C-alpha cells in the first residue's frame, strides 16, 4: 500500500482507505525524512484530538527519529523536542495539533479527516479554510481517512477528486488526487 501511494503521489492527496494499511506511518516517515534531510522544511500533522495528535507524533515522528544513526542525529539535532513539536538544527520542524491556521507549511498531513468532518464539522471547515491555505502550490497535503458516511468536508473533497478522476481531467497543483485503497 505504501509503495503504491508513493508511486502515485501528487501535491494534494486524498487517501480514502482501509484501517491499518500503514498510510499514516508512511506519510509521517516521508515528512520526517524531508525535514531531516532538507533545510527549512515546516510540516504539520493534524488529528481529530490533541491526544491522538500527540500519539501519532510520538510513534511516527519521535520514535523513528530517536532510532536514526547517531551520525545523522549529530548532524541534524533537535533544538526543540516536546510532545507537540520537533524542531531541528537545520531549520526544519514538525508540529502536531488539531489545527494549523497560521504559518507556512511545506507538508501537511490531516489524519482521519472523515471522522473530523462527521463529528466536528466546524473544525473540518477550519482545516479546509485555514490549514490548507498554509501550504503553497508545489508543496504537499495528505488527507487520509476511512469513510464516515455521506456529507461533510471529507466527502465533498473526495467526491470532487473522484469526479475529476472519472472524467480523466488533467489535474493542476491546486487539485486533489484521489487515492482509494479498499479493504478487499
Image: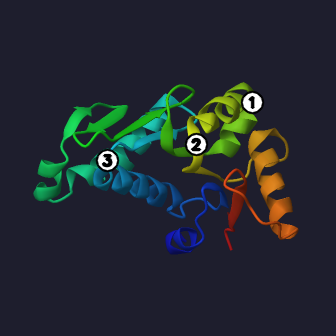
Q: Going 70% across and 50% down the picture, which residue do you hit?
A: 174
Q: Which of these two is toward me, 19 or 3?
A: 3
Q: Is residue 180 above or below residue 44?
A: below
Instruction: From the image, state whether disc 3 or disc 1 is nearer to you.
Output: 3
Judging by the rendered image, the residue that carries numbered circle 2 is 136
Q: Earlier in the sequence, mark 3 or mark 1?
A: 3
SS at badge 3? loop
**Viewport quadrant of the N terminus:** bottom right
Q: Going 85% across and 46% down the picture, which residue do you hit?
A: 150
How far apart are the two marked residues, 1 and 2, measured between alpha carbons?
24 Å
Judge from the rendering whether residue 172 lies leftward or rightward of residue 24; answer left or right: right
**Viewport quadrant of the C terminus:** bottom right
Judge from the rendering whether residue 96 lies leftward or rightward of residue 121; answer left or right: left
Judging by the rendered image, the residue that carries numbered circle 3 is 39
Q: Going 70% across and 45% down the picture, which residue do you hit?
A: 114
SS at badge 2? strand
Judge from the rendering whether residue 56 lies leftward or rightward of residue 178; answer left or right: left
Judging by the rendered image, the residue that carries numbered circle 1 is 121
Amino acid at each position: 500500500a505504501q509503495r503504491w501511494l508513493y508511486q502515485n503521489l501528487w501535491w494534494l492527496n486524498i487517501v480514502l482507505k482501509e484501517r491499518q494499511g500503514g498510510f499514516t506511518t508512511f506519510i509521517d516517515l516521508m515528512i520526517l525524512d524531508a525535514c531531516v534531510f532538507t533545510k527549512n522544511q515546516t510540516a504539520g500533522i493534524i488529528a481529530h484530538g490533541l491526544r491522538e495528535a500527540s500519539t501519532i507524533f510520538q510513534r511516527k515522528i519521535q520514535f523513528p527519529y530517536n532510532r536514526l544513526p547517531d551520525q545523522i542525529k549529530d548532524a541534524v539535532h533537535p533544538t526543540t523536542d516536546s510532545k507537540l513539536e520537533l524542531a531541528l538544527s537545520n531549520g526544519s520542524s514538525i508540529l502536531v495539533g488539531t489545527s494549523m491556521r497560521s504559518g507556512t507549511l511545506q507538508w501537511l498531513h490531516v489524519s482521519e479527516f472523515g471522522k473530523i468532518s462527521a463529528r466536528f464539522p466546524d473544525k473540518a471547515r477550519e482545516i479546509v479554510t485555514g490549514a490548507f491555505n498554509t501550504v503553497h502550490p508545489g508543496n504537499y497535503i495528505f488527507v487520509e481517512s476511512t469513510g464516515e458516511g455521506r456529507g461533510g468536508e471529507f466527502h465533498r473533497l473526495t467526491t470532487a477528486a473522484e469526479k475529476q478522476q472519472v472524467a480523466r481531467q488533467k489535474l493542476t497543483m491546486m487539485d486533489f488526487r484521489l487515492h482509494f485503497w479498499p479493504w478487499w
